[in-house]
């Protein structure tokens, strides 16, 4: 029985390694081919919508980056979401500098049944006039081609919803052990080309740092009212639009914008853990099965590879099929990260840390689950998120 279990484990890790590597290559090819250069410089009005709460350290850089776009017909709307720092003062100064392009609004008090970001976005949508709405975060920095990139790809691909990977800035070691986890989508989970071609909501994904929609289609789906209680409102927005028959797409947005999401390991853990359980719709069974799978087939194999290799050398044993399977898995999973990191312009030396990425993921998932079931909530920008 034990021999059968070991043999099954061997073939599973080989099969998963092959799947992950092939998936990462196909997604890399898709992202390279489908992400078109920013060609359109004029067209219907585009509205850039930015919620800002306690963003004094980055809001000026974000707004300034949007003031000289190659796309001519656009407006920028920023909502000061009851900030307790100098965000409001900075926005007032910026509005005086750019009265024609920039509009500033003061946020209303947050209703009890709403999350902060969806409610801020709902208020911005009421003021936006554009055919296209570009939702972006206050800590992003945009290239001059950002709006053009979004409109070009929406029009060419004939889709209603666009999102993708912008450039991620990582400085501390803690960030480098955490931020790459967002690329699990393109390396280990979903074929990204299915986001456009499939009608199933499960293939609709998004990252809230950069989302562009056709405003009419988004509002016909119900707007932010349908995701008012979600911390992963970006993913649920994509699923909602897909469920209503609209087309979505997921691309590489390196040429559009960049962001430093977090400044330390702890801030990254806090930010990601509040989203993981919500991402799977607070399903305990799915989370526990996912954690078990990650431990058995992604975290454990590198440890077993090192241990069994050392034992085989010291004991002068012949190489077993299990050891061969473990090395095949290690090479394929490492190759998967190599493809992902190359596609996303990440330092490839971090590939050698990939077992730590999965250990970190298990810890973050556990933190997310404990906080949710205990209803402890997370403090995020002065608010408690459950």
Image (cartoon, rainbow, N blue to C red):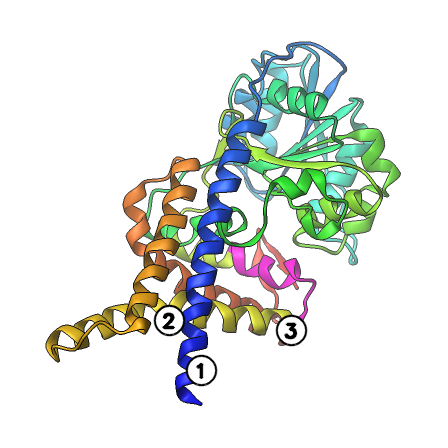
Few, some or many C-alpha atoms within 10 Å of disc 2 (few <14, some 14-19, many ≥20)?
Answer: some
Tag nearer the camera, 2 or 3: 2
Q: Say whether disc 3 or disc 1 marks the residue closer to the N-terminus.
A: 1
Residue in view at x 40 percent, y 42 percent: 339
Tell me the tag on residue 5: 1
134 vs 266: above or below: above
Q: Say whether disc 2 or disc 3 marks the residue closer to the N-terminus.
A: 3
Tag nearer the camera, 3 or 1: 1
Position in image of residue 12 (x %, y %):
46, 68
Tag nearer the camera, 2 or 1: 1
Residue in view at x 68 percent, y 67 percent: 282
In three-dimensional space, the C-alpha distance between marks 2 and 1, rounded to whole angstroms, equals 15 Å
Highlighted magenta segment, given as a residue range: 271-284
Q: Does the magenta segment cover residue 186?
A: no
Q: Is residue 43 visible?
A: yes
**Is 339 positioned to the left or the right of 281 in the image?**
left
121 vs 362: above or below: above
**Is 90 positioned to the left or the right of 17 in the image?**
right
User: Element at badge 3?
Assistant: helix
Which residue position is annotated with label 3? 284
Tell me the tag on residue 300: 2
Q: Does the magenta segment cover residue 273?
A: yes
**Is 93 positioned to the left or the right of 334 in the image?**
right
Position in image of residue 75 (x %, y %):
70, 19
């Amino acid at each position: 029985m034990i021999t059968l279990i070991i043999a099954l484990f061997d073939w599973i890790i080989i099969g998963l390694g092959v799947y992950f590597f092939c998936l990462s290559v196909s997604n890399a090819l898709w992202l390279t081919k489908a992400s078109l250069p920013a060609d359109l410089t004029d067209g219907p009005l585009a509205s850039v919508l930015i919620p800002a709460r306690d963003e004094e350290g980055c809001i000026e850089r974000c707004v300034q980056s949007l003031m000289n776009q190659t796309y001519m017909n656009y407006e920028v709307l920023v909502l000061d979401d009851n900030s307790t720092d100098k965000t409001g003062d900075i926005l007032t100064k910026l509005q005086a500098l750019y009265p024609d392009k920039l509009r500033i609004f003061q946020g209303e008090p947050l209703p009890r049944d709403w999350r902060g970001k969806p409610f801020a976005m709902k208020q911005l949508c009421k003021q936006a006039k554009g055919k296209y709405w570009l939702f972006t975060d206050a800590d992003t920095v945009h290239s001059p081609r950002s709006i053009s990139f979004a409109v070009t790809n929406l029009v060419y691909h004939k889709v209603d919803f666009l999102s993708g990977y912008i450039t991620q800035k990582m400085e501390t070691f803690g960030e480098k052990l955490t931020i790459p986890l967002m690329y699990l989508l393109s390396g280990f989970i979903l074929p990204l080309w299915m986001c456009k071609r499939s009608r199933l909501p499960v293939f609709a994904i998004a990252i809230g740092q950069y989302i562009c929609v056709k405003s009419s289609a988004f509002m016909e789906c119900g707007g932010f009212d349908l995701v008012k209680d979600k911390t992963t409102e970006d993913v649920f927005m994509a699923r909602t639009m897909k469920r209503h028959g609209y087309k979505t797409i997921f691309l590489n947005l390196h040429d559009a914008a960049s962001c430093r999401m977090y400044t330390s390991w702890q801030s990254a853990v806090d930010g990601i853990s509040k989203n993981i359980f919500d991402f799977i719709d607070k399903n305990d069974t799915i989370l526990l099965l996912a954690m078990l799978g990650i431990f058995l087939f992604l975290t454990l194999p590198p440890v077993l590879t090192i241990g069994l290799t050392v034992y085989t050398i010291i004991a002068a044993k012949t190489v077993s099929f299990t050891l061969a399977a473990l090395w095949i898995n290690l090479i394929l999973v490492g190759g998967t990260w190599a493809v992902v990191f190359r596609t996303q312009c990440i330092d490839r030396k971090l590939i050698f840390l990939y077992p730590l990425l999965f250990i970190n993921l298990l810890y973050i998932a556990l933190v997310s689950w404990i906080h949710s079931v205990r209803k402890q909530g997370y403090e995020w920008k002065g608010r408690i998120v459950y």
